[in-house]
Image (spheres, rainbow, N blue to C red):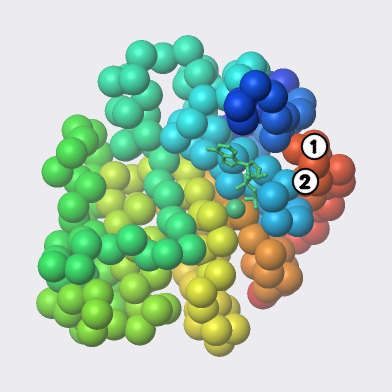
Amino acid sequence: MKNVIEARGIYKSYTLGSTEVPILRGINLNVGAGEIVALMGPSGSGKSTLLGILGGLDLPTSGSILIDGIDITRLPESKLAEIRGTKIGFVFQAYNLVSTLTALENIALPSYFTNGKKKDPNELIEIVGLGHRKNNKPTEMSGGEQQRVAIARALINNPKILFGDEPTGNLDSKTEVKVLHLFQKLREDFGTTIFLVTHSDEVARIADRIIHIRDGKIREVSNHGSHL
Ligand code: ADP
Ligand code: MG
């Protein structure tokens, strides 16, 4: 299986006053094409920091990240932005939709800022089960619907990898299961690689692999097939 994410010797520290605070302390990991990975660990263990670095939103203090074979830690910002825009999609706990735009307009929005292969927003909104909500604004939709719009938006530029930072953290358990089915469908239909930070056992259940992180280090990796 081809690796779409390779992290080599990732260290990250923040400087607080005159002290250097280590957050990530030597992370190595590979994620194969089409894998669903769950990253779990206590609050403050460095999950969001790692996700941001893997997705090119932030740089490590040392180490390298290969996305689809390209080392994104050694690129000029314009190149990095291009890779972020075309190979990577992000979903967060807060849906971060533009409140003045309709569901369909929100989904289409990132396509105006990048070149390359795009998906059809009308098709995506059907895939996430919201064909009847095209013209609704975010305030007219439930949390689960808004998150499904955010997921469709993250897919508009046809990314290889979808990163989620606690994407079901604000959803009730029934809605969570719907969103998880959607992630599984995306992997099946498009071969999307899905990397999710989560506290949820439900999310862990759909993962092929669960990576446990504590104090900035990987402590345990468990493999299992998905059972949802
Ligand atoms: P998690 O997502 O696992 O809860 P985070 O990656 O958000 O953890 O944070 C890990 C640690 O890094 C926390 O102690 C947090 O306070 C610290 N941290 C995160 N971002 C910054 C920053 N920009 N500046 C300083 N410290 C930060
Ligand atoms: Mg976090």
Residue 200 image point, x, y percent: 68, 69
Residue located at (44% from left, 35% from top): 57
User: Could you tell me if the residues under marks 2 and 1 are in contact, i.e. CB atoms within 8 Å?
Assistant: yes
Residue 219 image point, x, y percent: 86, 43
Residue 130 image point, x, y percent: 29, 78
Instruction: Name the kind of residue labelled 2 in the image.
Output: Ile
Residue labelled with disc 1:
217
Q: Residue 108's quadrant in the figure?
A: bottom left
Question: Toward the viewer: 66 or 11?
Answer: 11
Residue labelled with disc 2:
213
Residue located at (18% from left, 52% from top): 109
Position of the N terminus, as image quadrant, is: top right
- Residue 191 visible in the displayed image: no
Furthest toward the front, the residue is 17
Q: Residue 165's quadrant in the figure?
A: bottom right
Residue located at (69% from left, 50% from top): 44
Residue 81 badge = none
Instruction: Name the kind of residue labelled 1 in the image.
Output: Lys
